[in-house]
Image (cartoon, rainbow, N blue to C red):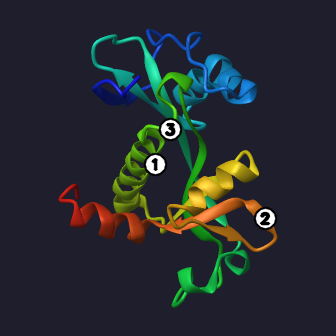
Amino acid sequence: MTIPPWHEEPIAKLHDRAAFDCGDAQMNEFLQRFARQSHEQNAAKTFCAIDDSTPNRILGFYTIAPSAVVHEAVPASMTRGLARHDVSGFKLARLATDQTVAGQGLGGRLLAAAALRCLRLAGEGGGILLIIDAKSERAAEWYASYGAEPLQGKPLTLVMPLATFAADLRAKGLL
């Protein structure tokens, strides 16, 4: 199956969370039981890729929240010129695609959508990093393929400068 036309929207009651299956029971459970409540309580925000022809079908999702990491754990190339305080950014807590569209590029598009949203938020409140909470070594390798680097001593927590996304999005005329 190819990825159908889709749009992004905040998680809502009308979305069929029970039908979503990314192949990871914990990710599925988060989406089904906790994502909307966390979204409504402003604990973390979840945004869904929704099938244009089936408005309740979730093709994929990502969850973000404000965050920071200890300065010393961040690769030096990302902290040049910064005070030695925690480095602020946004945690990409979760990102998953439904198995029916897996391997077709939707994950990369959702990563870009998350980065764009974080860039807009950073323009208002600050933040220079996308802090990625990979759930497995395989996921960490996938994020690394987009240029993310692991924090010192934490191979499943990776970071990318939001400026990297900004440059890429500008080059594509999306920012």
Mark 1 or 3: the one toward you = 3
Sequence-earlier tag: 1 or 3:
3
| 51 to the left or right of 108 | left
The residue lying at 44 percent from left, 9 percent from top is: 14
Mark 2 or 3: the one toward you = 3
For the residues bearing labels 1 and 2, Cβ distance under 8 angstroms: no
The residue lying at 52 percent from left, 38 percent from top is: 62
SS at mark 3 in the image: loop
Residue type (three-letter) at the residue carrying disc 3: Gly
Residue type (three-letter) at the residue carrying disc 2: Lys
Q: Position of residue 24 (x, y in %)?
A: 71, 29
Label 2 CA crowd tier, 10 Å (few <14, some 14–19, many 20+): few
Question: Where is the N terminus found, in terms of image quarters?
Answer: top left
According to the picture, the residue beneath numbered tag 2 turns out to be: 154
According to the picture, the residue beneath numbered tag 3 turns out to be: 103
| 148 to the left or right of 173 | right
According to the picture, the residue beneath numbered tag 1 turns out to be: 111
For the residues bearing labels 2 and 3, Cβ distance under 8 angstroms: no
The residue lying at 39 percent from left, 44 percent from top is: 109
| 109 to the left or right of 18 | left
